[in-house]
């Protein structure tokens, strides 16, 4: 089922890792995807970095929450259908439990200064984790990729950060570009074989 | 009846919110505020505040919050299930296709073209969070949060150079920030 230097986790390991990541992650799908990359790829070697990147791209361009979509894809890749069930349960369990409690104790929760401080401090840590992931991914692109890959990275960043285009449209545009690239390569191969 | 309606509403949220996060907010508002009046506008904005302060995707957080309000824990469960069902069907199918065809040369080329873009999108998400960490909005204008900035640099060294555990580092940042603020106040 798995190839290369990766090994599949047990369902219990997958559940525990995903649960901890989901319970401690604030602020959007890319944050949880960064933490999954650090844990599943760098720490445990359950998946390849390239697989994780593919899953984030697919998760971003599909309906639904990025965290749930990434959990489905990586759960299936590592442990098949039971992997999906385990990874999805571990992803939604923390928000399900926490929000159920909060909907009852909302006022005490929203006015807590200590909680606001705790969250602000954790955000500093989250920023560091994501920068670490970004640096590793950027390194891979620059070392292993060609000029086209670096250009795609720079253009996608400019489109997202400066032009404020939605991440989904950027991914879909690059998907189209990738398909055109394959078609051109196939075309020139046929030309060469004539 | 209410459970069925909850399920259908959040199924629609799950089905039509492509891109996750804040892309889902107008859809959720349309269903739970405008169409069914399950929450007032004020409660909805409270919900967004909570969703930002708690782990988990906004859509799942909203489903749980509204579900609990309307029909207790079963409501939370049904609404959350409705919200993730479209993903479960569609994304699982793509997962199967990925395993079957992902190693084909043409598919690999397309996917390899997309990977640098993913790195760029994560970089952009990072900058948004970093600005939030470094600057605090005060009535007098923007101010640099020195303590948060120092913690960010410290955490980066801990994770990247010392290879410390990412989640423990995040939690340590939260605790250190809170303790320092409380100490300053006393």
Image (cartoon, rainbow, N blue to C red):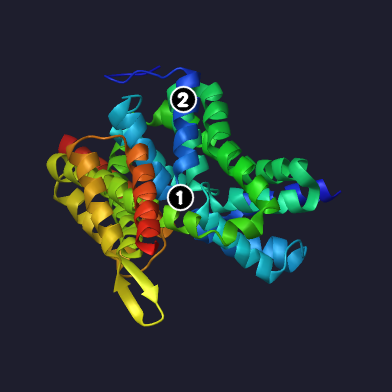
| Residue B107 visible here | no
Q: Which label is found at residue A184?
A: none
Which residue does the image show at 26% across and 35% down from the upper left?
B164
Residue B35 place in picture, x, y as percent: 75, 65
- Locate residue A9: give its quadrant: top left
Is residue A55 shown left or right of residue A91? left
- Locate residue A34: give its quadrant: top left
Is residue A50 shown left or right of residue A66? left
Residue A97 place in picture, x, y as percent: 63, 40
Q: Which residue lies under the disc numbered 1?
A: A26
Q: Which residue lies under the disc numbered 2?
A: A14
Judging depth in this view, the residue of A67 and B48 nearest the camera is B48
- Locate residue A32: give its quadrant: top left
Judging depth in this view, the residue of A85 and A35 nearest the camera is A35
Residue A114 place in picture, x, y as percent: 48, 56
Residue closest to the far right? B1
């Amino acid at each position: 089922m798995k190839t290369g230097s990766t090994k599949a986790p047990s369902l219990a390991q997958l559940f525990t890792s995903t649960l901890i990541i989901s319970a401690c992650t604030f602020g959007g799908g890319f944050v949880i995807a960064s933490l999954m990359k650090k844990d599943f790829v760098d720490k445990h070697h359950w998946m390849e970095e390239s697989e994780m990147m593919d899953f984030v791209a697919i998760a971003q361009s599909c309906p639904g929450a990025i965290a749930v979509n990434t959990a489905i894809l990586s759960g299936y890749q590592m442990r098949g259908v039971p992997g999906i069930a385990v990874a999805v349960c571990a992803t939604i369990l923390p928000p399900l439990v926490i929000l159920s409690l909060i909907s009852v104790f909302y006022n005490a929760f929203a006015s807590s200064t200590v909680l606001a401080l705790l969250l602000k401090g954790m955000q500093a840590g989250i920023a560091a984790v994501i920068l670490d992931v970004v640096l590793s991914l950027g390194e891979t692109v620059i070392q292993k990729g060609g000029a086209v890959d670096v250009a795609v990275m720079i253009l996608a960043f400019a489109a997202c950060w400066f032009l404020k285009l939605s991440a989904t449209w950027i991914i879909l545009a690059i998907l189209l570009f990738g398909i055109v690239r394959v078609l051109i390569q196939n075309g020139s191969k046929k030309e060469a074989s004539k | 009846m209410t459970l069925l309606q909850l399920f259908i509403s959040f199924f629609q949220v799950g089905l039509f919110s492509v891109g996750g996060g804040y892309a889902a907010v107008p859809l959720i508002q349309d269903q739970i505020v405008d169409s069914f009046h399950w929450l007032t506008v004020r409660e909805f904005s409270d919900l967004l505040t909570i969703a930002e302060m708690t782990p988990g995707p906004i859509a799942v957080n909203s489903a749980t919050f509204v579900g609990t309000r309307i029909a207790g824990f079963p409501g939370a469960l049904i609404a959350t299930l409705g919200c993730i069902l479209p993903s479960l069907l569609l994304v699982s199918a793509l997962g199967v296709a990925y395993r079957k065809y992902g190693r084909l040369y043409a598919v690999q080329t397309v996917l390899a073209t997309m990977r640098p873009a993913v790195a760029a999108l994560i970089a952009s998400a990072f900058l948004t969070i970093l600005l939030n960490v470094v600057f605090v909005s005060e009535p007098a204008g923007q101010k640099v949060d020195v303590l948060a900035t120092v913690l960010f640099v410290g955490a980066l060294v801990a994770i990247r150079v010392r290879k410390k555990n990412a989640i423990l580092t995040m939690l340590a940042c939260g605790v250190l920030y809170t303790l320092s603020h409380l100490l300053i106040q006393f």
